[in-house]
Image (cartoon, rainbow, N blue to C red):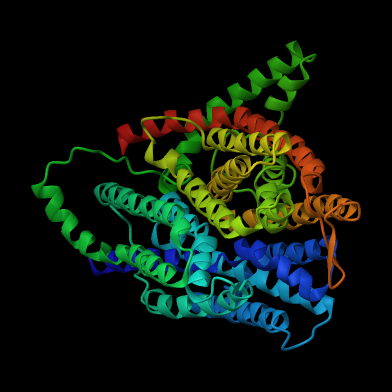
Amino acid sequence: MVGESRKWMILIATIWIQAFTGTNFDFSSYSSTLKSVLGISQLQLNYLSVASDLGKAFGWCSGVLLLYFPLWVLMFMATFTGLLGYGLQWLLIQKLIVLPYFLVFLLCLLSGCSICWFNTVCFVLCIRNFPTNRPLALSLSISYNGLSAALYTLIAKAINPEDDTIYLLLNALIPLITSSLALIPILRQPPSQQLSTDTAARDSSIFFILNILAVITGLYLLLLNTLSSDASTSRVLFVRALFLLFLPLCLPTIVYAKNWACRSIPTRFHFDSPSFNLVDIDNLQLHKELIGSEQSNALNIVGSYDSTEKEEYFGKVVEKDRLILLGEEHLARFLVRKWDFWLYYLAYFCSGTIGLVYSNNLGQIAESLGYYSQLSSLITLYSTCSFFGRLLSAAPDFLHGKVDFARTGWLAVATLATPIAFFLLTASGSEVILRTSTGLIGLSSGFMFSAAVSITSELFGPNSAGINHNILITNIPIGSLLYGLLAAQVYDDNAGSSIQESLMHEASVCMGRQCYLKTFIWWACISLLGLFSSSVLFLRTRPAYDRLERNRSFLSLYT
C-alpha cells in the first residue's frame, strides 16, 4: 500500500512539473516587447522562436545524461538551464544589461533545452511507475503541460497586469519552485512491482477520476480567466487554481480506501485495464507466434494484390512494407527505412508543428488584426484547448473494449481540425473566427503532442520509444524554421506597404489582414497534406491493430 501511494505521489509530481514548465507556450505574450527592445524585424524574431524549438532537437542529450546521473539531477539541470536562459532575457528586456543578438539566440536555445529535459524526466517517471497503465499516466501528465500558458497568464495578471516582461521572470523562477516541491516524491520512488489484473483495473478507475479533475481544472481556467481583469481578482482565481492542482494529493487516501470500496460498494462501471502498446511483454512472444501464419498469409495477399492491381498506385502505397506486428522494436537505422515512419513524420510536421508555430506568432497575429488587447485571453484559449486535446488522446484507452478504433485513426480525425481552422482564418478576420480557429488549432495540436508518445511506442516498440520519439520531434525545429520563415517574410513584406506602419526602434509593425493572409492559405494547404498522410497511416496500420485485438482476445482465454 505504501508503494502504491508513493507511485501516485510520483504522478502528482509529474503533473506539477508539466503544468509549470511549458514555458514555450507564452512566447507570444512578450515577443512584441522583445522585438521592440532588440529593434529587430519579424524575420529575426522568428529565428528566436526557432531557437527555442531547436532545443527539442537536443532531447537525446537528456537520455544520455540519464545513463550517468539520477533523475533528480537531470531535473535540476533543466531548472538551472531555464533559469539562466530566461533570467538573462528578462534582464535584457528590462534594459539592465545589453546582449548581442547571437547571444540572445543562444539563450533561447538553452530555454528550449530545459523544456525538453523536463519532459524527459516526466516521461521516465510515468513509464517506470505505471508499466500497465502507461498511456493513461503519460497522457494525463502531458496534458497539464498545455495549461502552462493559462497559469502563467493568471500569475502575471496577479502580479502586474500591465507588464508583459513579467513572463520571462516567471519562466525563470517558477520551474525552480516546482522542482523543489517535486523533489521529495521523486527521491522516494517505490520499487517496481508486478500488478495483478484487479489492481490494474482499479488503477484505471482512479485515472478516470483524475481525468475528471483535470477537465474541471481546464474548464475553470478557460471560463474564469476572462474575469481576471485586475490584480486582486487574478490572485483569488490563482489561489483556487492552485487548490485544483493540489486536490489530487488526496489520492493516497483513495488508494488505501479502494479495497474497502470495492468490497463494500457494488461497482456499476467496469474499466478494462488498458495495455500501453499492445500486449503484455510476457505475452509478446506468444503474440508473435499467433500471427506467424497470418503474417505469411498477409504477405501472400499483398503479393497477389500487387500482381492484380498494379495500376492502382494508392493501393500500392497502402500495402507496401506495412507494419504487421505492433510493438516490434525498431532501431533508428531500421526506423528511417519504414514508410510508416515517414508518413507519421509528415503528419506531425504538417499538423502539430504548424499549430506550435501558430502559437508562437499569435502575438503578431492578434496585433495585426487589431485584437492585441485580447492577447492574454487568446493565449489562455489556445493553452486550455491544447490541454483538452491532450486529455482526449487518452480516449482510446478509456474506450478500449467498447470502441475498437486504431489510435492512428484517432490521430487522423484530430488533424482534420487544423485545415478547417486555417481556411476559416483565410475567409474572415473577425474576432469570433480568430477565437474559434485558435481553439481548433490548440485542440488538434494538443492531441498530436500527447498521442505521439503512445503511437511511437505502439508502432516502433516501447524499448526504443525514447530515441525514436526524439527522432520524430526533429520535425519541430525544422517546421518552426520553414513555417516561421514563410510567416515572417509575408509579414515583413506587408509591413513596408502597410498604411498603419509604425517604427519602434527600427522594428516594423504590420497592421491588417494582409499581414498573415497568404501565410494562412499556405498553412491550410500544408495541413491538408498532414491530414492525407495521417489517413494513409491509419489505413496501413489498421490491420495490425485489428490483429492485435483478435490475438488479445485469444490470449485472455488462456491467461
Residue 344 percent across, percent down from the top left: 67, 41
Q: Is residue 68 visible?
A: no
On the rendered image, what quadrant is the N terminus found in? bottom left
* Of 249 and 469, the residue lying toward us: 249
* Residue in the image at 33% along x and 62% along y: 193
Q: Compared with residue 370, is residue 3 higher up or lower down, i.e. above or below?
A: below
Q: Compared with residue 205, is residue 256 higher up or lower down, i.e. above or below?
A: below
In this picture, residue 343 sits left or right of residue 440: right
Q: Compared with residue 151, is residue 397 higher up or lower down, i.e. above or below?
A: above
* Residue in the image at 12% along x and 55% along y: 260
Residue 42, image quadrant: bottom right
* Residue in the image at 50% along x and 57% along y: 142
* Residue in the image at 70% along x and 45% along y: 345
Residue 396 percent across, percent down from the top left: 44, 38
* Of 297 and 385, the residue lying toward us: 385
Q: Residue furthest bottom?
A: 96
Q: Compared with residue 172, is residue 295 higher up or lower down, i.e. above or below?
A: above
Q: Residue furthest left?
A: 264
* Of 99 and 41, the residue lying toward us: 41
In this picture, residue 185 sits left or right of residue 125: left
Residue 439 percent across, percent down from the top left: 56, 45
On the rendered image, what quadrant is the C terminus found in? top left
Q: Residue furthest front?
A: 499
Q: How many badges with numbers are in the image?
A: 0
